[in-house]
Image: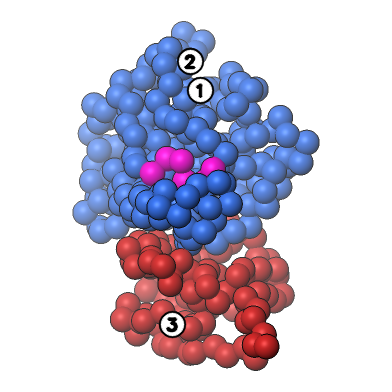
């Protein structure tokens, strides 16, 4: 991130809002980013935007859904939703073979996934606000999470942490809140649609920052 | 036997990642993401990426936010306290951190018969 980007963000804030607000969805693989993107898109546009799967790196390219308008308590918010591939430090094609893929498919998926990680990092500079989606059943103390949040903090991008999968028994939203006390955290289940009203309330607060 | 190759921070951008490295002067978040980008583009049959962990000497309370805040302060002030450990994922299985220690879990080599 250059100083230009910081100044650009400062002057945009000073002299008015950008026309198309970009809301990014970031996080490690399999946290439920695309499930959340689908949930938001389905709630407000009536259609899903991303394919979801239990196999890591299902989303391997950045997907943008333009002009989603969310309404809550008489307020209205329009943004472009950007679903990004999961950020990881390693991708081994042999991991995909465990999911019954053949070697060729696994290698192709690994190749696409590496490109997806690079694209997700490149897109950080284009975001106005970001939802960081974390799997609430997994310990948040990972270097990937530190790197993602650190990059967003360094760019001064407003962040809402979404602790996903709260429908699962092992989920622990408090552990995520304790790890990132500087950011608001909201527990949801994108899959089951749990606590979404509170999520949309937090989304409005995020965009106002 | 665990061996770590020490490199000073200013050589980090030229490093060839073949072994476990100890970088004196921790990487800031932007450098970490640049390293991830670079190593992602190098992934092939023999190289599946990296494991990485950064710590600060003077942070006793090692909460994630403390790491992030310190990393950004280092970035802005061009300060380099702490260290980063990075290694190829084929050798380093996992790096675990707690307030007082870093555990580097490495892959066991198969015994020759």
**Residue at point 52%, 51% (across, down):** A96
Question: Vertically, is A114 above or below B27?
Answer: above
Q: How much space separates mark 3 and mark 2, taking CA atoms?
A: 48 Å
Q: Is residue A118 above or below residue B89?
A: above
User: Mark 2 = which residue?
Assistant: A43
The quadrant the C terminus of chain B occupies is bottom right
**Quarter of the image where the N terminus of chain B is located:** bottom right
Q: Which chain is blue?
A: A
- The residue drawn where x is 29% and y is 37% is A13
Q: Quadrant of residue A111?
A: bottom left
- Label 3, label 1: how many angstroms apart (C-alpha)? 43 Å
Position of residue A138 relative to residue A205, above or below, is below
- Give the labeled residue for mark 1: A39
Query: Please, which chain is the residue tagged with disc 2 on?
Result: A
Any mark on residue B8, and which?
none
In front of the other: A55 or A70: A55
Query: Tag on residue B18?
Result: 3
- Examine the image and state in which quarter residue B2 appears: bottom right
Number of labels in the image equals 3
């Amino acid at each position: 991130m250059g100083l230009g980007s910081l100044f650009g963000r400062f002057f945009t804030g000073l002299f008015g809002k950008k026309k198309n607000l970009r809301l990014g969805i970031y996080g490690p693989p399999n946290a439920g980013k695309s499930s959340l993107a689908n949930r938001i898109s389905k709630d407000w546009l009536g259609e899903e935007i991303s394919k979801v799967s239990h196999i890591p790196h299902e989303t391997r390219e950045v997907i943008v859904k333009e002009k989603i308008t969310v309404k809550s308590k008489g307020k209205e918010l329009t943004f472009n939703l950007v679903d990004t591939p999961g950020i990881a430090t390693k991708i081994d094609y042999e991991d995909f073979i465990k999911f019954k893929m053949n070697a060729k498919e696994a290698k192709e998926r690994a190749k696409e996934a590496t490109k997806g990680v690079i694209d997700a990092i490149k897109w950080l500079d284009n975001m106005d606000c970001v939802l960081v989606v974390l799997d609430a059943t997994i310990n948040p103390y990972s270097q990937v999470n530190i790197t993602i949040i650190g990059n967003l903090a360094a760019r001064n991008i407003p962040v809402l942490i979404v602790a996903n999968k709260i429908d699962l028994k092992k989920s622990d939203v408090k552990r995520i809140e304790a790890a990132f006390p500087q950011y608001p955290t909201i527990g949801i289940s994108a899959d089951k649609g749990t606590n979404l009203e509170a999520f949309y309330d937090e989304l409005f607060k995020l965009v106002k920052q | 036997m665990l061996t770590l190759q020490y490199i000073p921070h200013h050589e980090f951008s030229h490093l060839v990642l073949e072994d476990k490295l100890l970088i004196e002067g921790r990487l800031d978040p932007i450098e970490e993401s640049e390293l991830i980008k670079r190593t992602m583009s190098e992934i092939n049959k023999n190289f599946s990426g990296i494991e990485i962990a950064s710590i600060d000497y003077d942070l006793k309370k090692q909460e994630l936010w403390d790491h992030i805040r310190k990393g950004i302060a280092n970035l802005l002030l061009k300060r380099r306290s702490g260290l980063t450990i990075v290694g190829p994922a084929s050798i380093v299985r996992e790096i675990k951190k707690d307030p007082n220690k870093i555990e580097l879990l490495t892959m066991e080599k198969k015994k020759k018969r």
